[in-house]
Amino acid sequence: MKPTLNLKPKGPAEKRHQRGRTAAWALAFLGAFGLPFTAVAAQRGFLDREDAFAGSKLSTEFRAARSARGSNQMVKVIIQYKQPVMNRMAAPGEAEMRAKGATVNARLGSIRAVAMRVPAWMIPQIAKNPNVAYITPDRPVQMTGYDEDAGTAVSRDVAATQFSVDGTGVGVAVIDSGVADHADLHDASGASRVVYSESFVAGDIATSDKYGHGTHVAGIIGGNGFSSQSGSGYARPLTGMAAGVNIINLRVLDQNGSGTDSQTIAAIQRAIALKATYNIRVINLSLGRGVYESYTLDPLCQAVEAAWNAGIVVVVAAGNSGRDNSIGTHGYSMIGAPGNDPYVLTVGATRTRGTATRTDDVKASYSSKGPSLIDHIVKPDLVAPGNRIASLRAAGSTLDTNHPEFQEGSANGGTPQYFRLSGTSMATPVVVGAVALMLQQNPTLTPDQVKARLMKTAWKGFGLYSSALDSNGNTYSDQYDVFSYGAGYLDVQAALANTDVAQGAALSPTAVYNVLNGSVYLANTTIRLTANSVVWGNSVVWGTSVVWGNSTLTANSVVWGNSVVWGNVNDSAFSVVWGNSVVWGNSNTQAFSSGDDGEN
């Protein structure tokens, strides 16, 4: 495991959360940083018993690790503080740390944190600082098309004709692998609609897309179909959801699709700073990683909350681990971070089967399901098309070079302009485009009002079960419930036609297990808010019966095949999801796109 963000798009069947004994995993994690571990060192922890309070400030990896006290090996960490940290001023105790060998990688004032490289022996000492709130590794993050038309299935075309909106004037921050210059991202005068670009990749200031993922995402959001217009040899224009938006290109992934928490947080921080300059109203995060602690402590989750509170809608991919049964949950509780945060809008993927109607659409079997680990937040919030989506090609990028079979050429020959990818990475920008249309129509909407309206108006006509066949001939079965498709299927026409304005915070609810009757029910997520300030309360307009259907989930309503996943204390999955056992997420932050050609 490299101490970098590995955002390579892997096939859903290959994405596996790292499991095993806590101490053993932690040793391996820190071992990736070159830390020496000996038999003697393994007999004592990072912290002595009397340091238990300081230990509570350390992430699970650091609490469980065994390390020689004298180790000078450097570890990348993110230190969150209890009080604001200024981007141009040293944090409390920083001068002393630097004097003893620590270096500052980035100041992350939006989450009151600093990213540093510190000697391993220093970590327990930092935790004793009364100004320190929490310490985590600077974790890696992971990226989360037969040509399906994503827009048709969610009524995109109605936006331009019936409502006369195309996202013009709205800024969308694409935090990904960069955005290549492409004709479909130019305006009518030929000027690029990528109005700002910056790289946060360590040692690489280039902002072009060397990996090929960010350009594809940007095209789904705002491609205007110029390269596939009439006479081009393409059967139809391959347009994005909101062809008039401006793109703010914030590159955090390198040519191998790899990055880190701190790079992603720094990009989110820049989007907040540039909000007024470029009217940034939406952030697209088609990436993520595993869940290690509560969202209230996770620095990546704290960053997306900072953007949300700054008035920016943050849309995050759910992940592609819906087929993962490595912990006996059949893909449940596999939502990645920061998609586990109750503030953000988390998106799962469907497949349209190549038809214009949504009635035959089904959920993609690789789309990760909730509830989230540790906090049991109900996710995803909704689903959108993400299977075998054709969008912009970044010529010569890593994906383009390694997978020429995914190129979409025209009947006229010539250089292919489009590329196919599948995953929740592709479903996320579909929703982002819809958000841009809503905000052009009504710029006064807050992030919570946008989220609530999209969830209320989502189409809820799914059946109970479906099956999917992957490119290798494997068949997967899915049951439909609130943890697999959330509030329903994105419906752009319904969202634009709706005029309801929610009051309060649209936090995703929490799933609660009732030990008395073995059922699971939904409750308001009110950790930092009063019950009356949450949208999903007792109001007639936004009550749970409108958004979710039946708010009480019996054990039978969340059964995968014949295996009871929730509500049975004797089931192996119970201790994973509802018990106290520690489950390790994938430490890589990657783009949530699959490495195969999607499902048939």
Image (tube, rainbow, N blue to C red):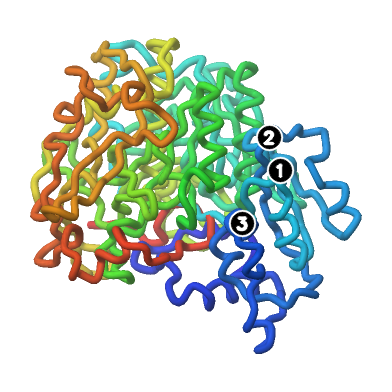
Q: Residue at x 57, y 24 (%)?
A: 193
Type of the residue with mark 1: Asn
- Residue at the disc numbered 3: 53
Instruction: Please state the total of marks drawn on the protein image.
Output: 3
Q: CA distance from mark 1 to mark 2?
A: 7 Å
- Residue at the disc numbered 1: 131
Type of the residue with mark 2: Gln
- Number of other residues with Cα within 10 Å of mark 3, as a class: few under 14, some 14 to 19, many 20 or more: few
Q: Are marks 1 and 2 in contact (CB under 8 Å)?
A: yes
- Residue at the disc numbered 2: 83
Report the disc number at residue 347: none
Residue 35 location in percent, x, y? Answer: 71, 75
The numbered mark, 1 or 3, whose residue comes first in the sequence reads 3
* Label 1 vs label 3, nearer the camera: 3
Residue 23 location in percent, x, y? Answer: 53, 75
Q: Residue at x 46, y 36 (%)?
A: 219
Q: Is residue 263 above or below residue 142?
A: above
Residue 228 location in percent, x, y? Answer: 40, 34
